[in-house]
Amino acid sequence: MGSSLTRPLEYSDPFKLPGPRDGALPVSPTAPDAAEVPLSPAQTPVFKSCWSCRLLSGAGLLGAGAYVYLMARRPMKLGIAPGPGTIATMTLGICIGCWGIVILTDPKGKGYRVA
C-alpha cells in the first residue's frame, strides 16, 4: 500500500506556482466552439428502465424489513420488556421496509417526464 507518481516532480519549491512550460501553448480565454466540445454519454437512472428489477428488489426489501421487525417483536409477545437493542432492531426493520417502498414507488422518477 503505497503511492506512485505518474510523472516526475517538476518544481522543488512548494510555494512557487507552476507557470507555462517552454513551448506550451497559451490558454485561450474564449469558450470552445460547440463542435469542439465532446458530448457526454447520457446517464440512465438505475431503477427506471427495469420494472421487474424494481418490483423484485422492492418486494425483497419489504419482506426483509418485515422479518427483522417481527423477529424483534417476538420476545415482547412472550412478556419480556424491550431493551434498547430490541427497539433499535425494530427501527432498523421499519427503515428497511420503507426503503423497499421507496424503490417500489420511485417518487423521484415521477417528478419529470422522460421522452
Image (cartoon, grey):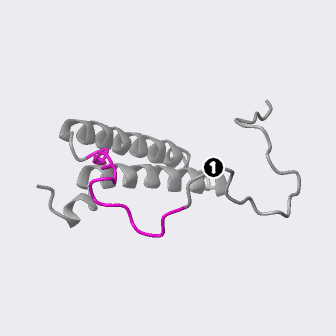
Say what amino acid the circle numbered 1 marks.
Answer: Gly
Q: Is residue 49 above or below residue 108?
A: above
Q: Is residue 88 above or below residue 66?
A: below
Q: Is residue 25 above or below residue 67?
A: below
* Residue at far bottom of view: 29
Q: Quadrant of the N terminus?
A: top right
Please state the extent of the stretch shown in magenta in the rendering. Answer: 27-47
Q: On the image, numbered disc 1 is attached to which residue? A: 23
- In this rendering, position of residue 41 left or right of residue 12: left
The image position of residue 100, as x and y in percent, is 34, 48
Badge 1 element: loop
Residue depicted at x 28% and y 59%:
34
Q: Is residue 86 magenta?
A: no
The image position of residue 101, as x and y in percent, is 31, 53
The image position of residue 38, as x and y in percent, is 33, 49
* Residue at far top of view: 1
- In this rendering, position of residue 36 left or right of residue 112: right
In terms of depth relative to the viewer, which is nearer, 76 or 47?
A: 47
The image position of residue 17, as x and y in percent, is 77, 63
* Residue at far left of view: 115
For disc 1, the neighbor class at 10 Å (few under 14, some 14 to 19, many from 20) is few
Q: Quadrant of the C terminus?
A: bottom left
Residue depicted at x 19% and y 41%:
51
| Prevailing secondary structure of the magenta residues | loop
In terms of depth relative to the viewer, which is nearer, 17 or 81?
A: 17
Residue depicted at x 62% and y 56%:
81
* Residue at far front of view: 23
In terms of depth relative to the viewer, which is nearer, 110 or 98?
A: 110
